[in-house]
Structure formats: C-alpha cells, structure tokens
Image (cartoon, coloured by chain):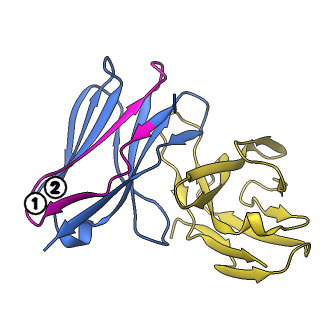
Amino acid sequence: QKEVEQNSGPLSVPEGAIASLNCTYSDRGSQSFFWYRQYSGKSPELIMSIYSNGDKEDGRFTAQLNKASQYVSLLIRDSQPSDSATYLCAVNMGQGGKLIFGQGTELSVKP
Amino acid sequence: EAQVTQNPRYLITVTGKKLTVTCSQNMNHEYMSWYRQDPGLGLRQIYYSMNVEVTDKGDVPEGYKVSRKEKRNFPLILESPSPNQTSLYFCASSFLLPGSPLHFGNGTRLTVT
C-alpha cells in the first residue's frame, strides 16, 4: 500500500463547478497535511495546509481533514480554467521536515 | 525575497560527464531536500539534509551525491550521469517544525544523452 494515495485523474469539471480532490494516507500518526498545485513543467506551489480535523477555508479553496478515516480532501469552488493543473497531496509523518507526496491528481477545468 | 534558487534551469549533457546542480535558500531553513519528478512516478526524494554536515538517503539515491557544508547551500552532484537520470529536478527547503511547508525551487530540467 502506498503511503499517500490520490486518484491520478484526469478529473474534468466545467467552469464554475466544484472540483473535489481526495487523498488517503497510511500513517495514523501523521500530523501535517498540505496541498500543492503544480502547472506543467513548473515547481509545486503551496495552496493549503491543514493540521486538525475539520474544514479550513481560504478563498475558493477548502481543505478537509478526517484523521479517523485517514483522508484529506481539497474542494475548489467556482472552478476556473486557470485552476487546470496537477494537485499534489503531501503528508508529514513526523520525520522532521520530510513530506510524503501522492502521485497527484490532474484537474482540467473546461470553459 | 524569500526563495529557493536552483541553477541551471536547463542542462543537456553527455553520459559520464560530471555535473553539479546548485541549490541555495535564504530563509535560514534547517531542512533541505532534492526530488526528481518523472511522468507517472510523481515526486521521488533523492537525498535530504536536516542540518549542516547531516545528510541522508531518500527513496532513489543511487547515482547521486550531495553535501551540506553551509546551511544555505545543498548542491546535487552526478558523478557519472546516465540517460536514466534524465528528469526534472527540484530542490526544496523548510524549517524542521512538523507543520512547516516545503518551499520549492524553480526546477532543473536535465537531459543526459
């Protein structure tokens, strides 16, 4: 079993819709969770971090964490074509700065 | 401006010719790491360092070397590059606090012929 799993996609949504991206992780002791956005050929860019159970909202983005079920999700409201990118879930499993990354989910927002 | 700087951005070389990719950060981060990214394989960690003179292997260390003589610098060395090291490389850094996010450099696209 992979330590951090994401559906690779592609996930296609129409402009203005809600995009839902999911991630599961294997280590129950994981403490910190991050979502990065990566455009093709570019470096990953941090968009959300979440540390406790529940929802965290930042503009059009909402991160949701459920430690009991070991999943973290990212919702993007009012999706725009500029949101088309690969979204990487990353989990800190308590080893200093080391993050474990999922494979990423490719999101395509159609005008 | 707080940043992680990698050089060069693009590099084409031939098999066996030693090369170094530099990485420098100006955020006083303790933790630095190198990743490679290949289609379908995601980000894979090559080496990481938690402090000066402290380095450790990641998931795919074969064929690579690193050093951490200063806190701000973490160069990646390919002593004898091979075509299977053709990839997109990222340097990243963070504080050692568990909730600290990684900050990435702009990447180095390496082609080994």
Q: Is residue A21 magenta?
A: yes
Q: Is A12 placed left or right of B32 in the picture? A: left
Density class for disc 2 (Cα within 10 Å; few <14, some 14-19, many ≥20) is few
Q: Is residue B66 visible?
A: no
* Foreground residue among A65 and A104: A104
Foreground of the two, B27 or B112: B112
- Report whether mark 1 lies on the same chain as mark 2: yes
Q: Identify the mark at residue A78; answer none if there is no mark.
A: 1
The residue at 69%/79% (across/down) is B8
Q: Chain of mark 2?
A: A
**Chain seen in blue:** A
Q: Are marks 1 and 2 in contact (CB under 8 Å)?
A: yes
Residue, x 51% and y 28% (percent of image)? A1
Tag 2 residue: A60
Q: Quarter of the image for the C terminus of chain A: give it.
A: bottom left
Q: Secondary structure at mark 1?
A: loop
| Mark sitting on residue B5 | none
Q: Is residue B108 left or right of residue A19?
A: right
Chain-order first, disc 1 or disc 2? 2
Query: Label 2's element?
Result: loop
Residue A54 to residue A58: above or below: above
Which of discs 1 and 2 lies nearer the camera? The answer is 1
* A15 drawn magenta: yes
Q: Which residues are magenta?
A: A5-30
Residue at image location 40% in from the left, 43% down from the top? A34
Residue type, mark 1 in image: Asp
From the viewer's side, name the closer residue of B29 and B63: B63
Q: Which chain is yellow?
A: B
> Is residue B105 visible in this depiction of the protein?
yes
